[in-house]
Amino acid sequence: MKLLLSNDDGVFAEGLAVLHQHLSQRHDTTVIAPDRNCSGASNALSLHQPLRIQKMKNGFYAVNGTPSDCVHLGLNRFMQEEPQLVVSGINHGANLGDDVIYSGTVAAATEGRYMGLPAIAVSLTNYKGGHFDTAAKVVLDILERLENHPLAPDQILNINVPDVPYEELAGIEVTRQGRRHRAESMVKDTDPYGRDIYWYGPVGSEQDAGPGTDFYAISRGYCSVTPLSVDMTAYQSLDEMQSWLEKKHNND
C-alpha cells in the first residue's frame, strides 16, 4: 500500500522515525512533516506565507508549515502518485477526549480525509515514549484490517496506545471520546523586561472517563480506537432548530 506519513511533533521526532521504520517494511511510505514541533496546531493552514519543502538526509521531507499544510501540499501538489491512505503519528503523548480538537496529529489525518483519502491518527500515551514500537505494530495491525474493511468516507480513526511492550497490551477496544473538565488557569509571569506574559496551564482532569470512553480503555491497558466524523453537523438538532426558527419568523 502507498502511504503518506506525517505528524505534529516535527520531522525529527522519534515517534515518526519508529513508525516509518515499521511501515516501510511492508508499505511504500513517503514522509512529509513539519520542520519543527507543531503540537496544538489543530487544523491551521499557513495562508500568509509561502510553503517550502526540503528533502532531509534520511529521505524525509520537511515543510515550514503546519501538519495540515504538510498533508495538503503532499496530496495536492508534491506527490507524483496519490497514496492510498494517510497516517499521522506517532504522537508523543495521548490524544484523548477533548484533546482531538487541538491536536495537530488528528488534524493531519483530518486533512487527508478532506482531500478524499482514508486516514488514521496514532498517539502513544506517554510523552517520553518508551514503546513507540508498540504503537507502530498496532498501526500495522489496523492497516491489515482496513484492507478488507474500508473506513466510511466521512470518518477517520483516532488511535491511542498505552506505553507498554506490545505483548502486554490487554487488547483493542472501540471507544467514544471522553471529556475533560475545563483547563486549569493560565500561568502569569514576567519576561526579562518586566512585561506580563502568560503560559497555558495544565489540561483539565478527566470528567467523562467511564466505560466505553477512550480514557477508560487506556486506564485498563487497552489500545483505544475511536472513529471520528469529519462532518461536525449536529444532525439530531436540525429538525428542532428548523422548528423554532420558523416559529420566530412567523411571529415576526
Image (tube, rainbow, N blue to C red):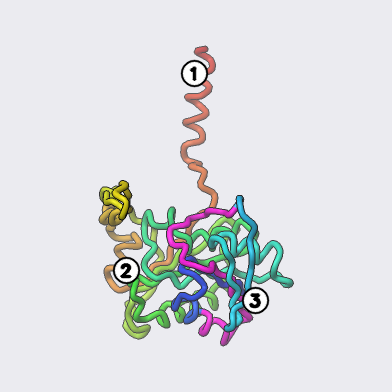
Residue occupying the point 26% across, 52% down = 207
Q: Which residues are magenta?
A: 20-46
Q: Position of residue 234 (x, y in %)?
A: 48, 42
**In the rendered structure, are the residues bearing label 2 and label 3 in contact, judged by CB atoms less than 8 Å apart?**
no
Residue occupying the point 37% across, 54% down = 98
Mark 3 Cα-neighbour bin, 10 Å: few <14, some 14–19, many ≥20: some
Name the amino acid, label 2: Ile
The residue carrying mark 1 is 248
Q: Whole-Å distance between the Cαs marked 2 and 1?
A: 47 Å
The numbered mark, 2 or 3, whose residue comes first in the sequence reads: 3
The numbered mark, 1 or 3, whose residue comes first in the sequence reads: 3
**In the rendered structure, are the residues bearing label 2 and label 1 in contact, judged by CB atoms less than 8 Å apart?**
no
Mark 1 Cα-neighbour bin, 10 Å: few <14, some 14–19, many ≥20: few
Q: Quadrant of residue 155?
A: bottom right
Q: Relative to 25, does residue 161 appear above or below in the rendering?
A: above
Q: Whole-Å distance between the Cαs marked 1 and 3?
A: 53 Å
Q: Relative to 149, does residue 198 appear above or below in the rendering?
A: above
The numbered mark, 2 or 1, whose residue comes first in the sequence reads: 2
Name the amino acid, label 1: Lys
Name the amino acid, label 3: Lys
The residue carrying mark 3 is 2
**In the rendered structure, are the residues bearing label 1 and label 3 in contact, judged by CB atoms less than 8 Å apart?**
no
Nearer-the-camera pick, 119 or 64: 64
Q: Relative to 186, does residue 143 appear above or below in the rendering?
A: below
Q: Relative to 244, does residue 13 appear above or below in the rendering?
A: below
The residue carrying mark 2 is 218
Nearer-the-camera pick, 92 or 115: 92
Q: Whole-Å distance between the Cαs marked 2 and 3?
A: 30 Å
Q: Position of residue 26 (x, y in %)?
A: 58, 85
Q: Quadrant of residue 178?
A: bottom left
Dot 2 falls on a residue whose secondary structure is: helix
Magenta highlight on residue 39: yes
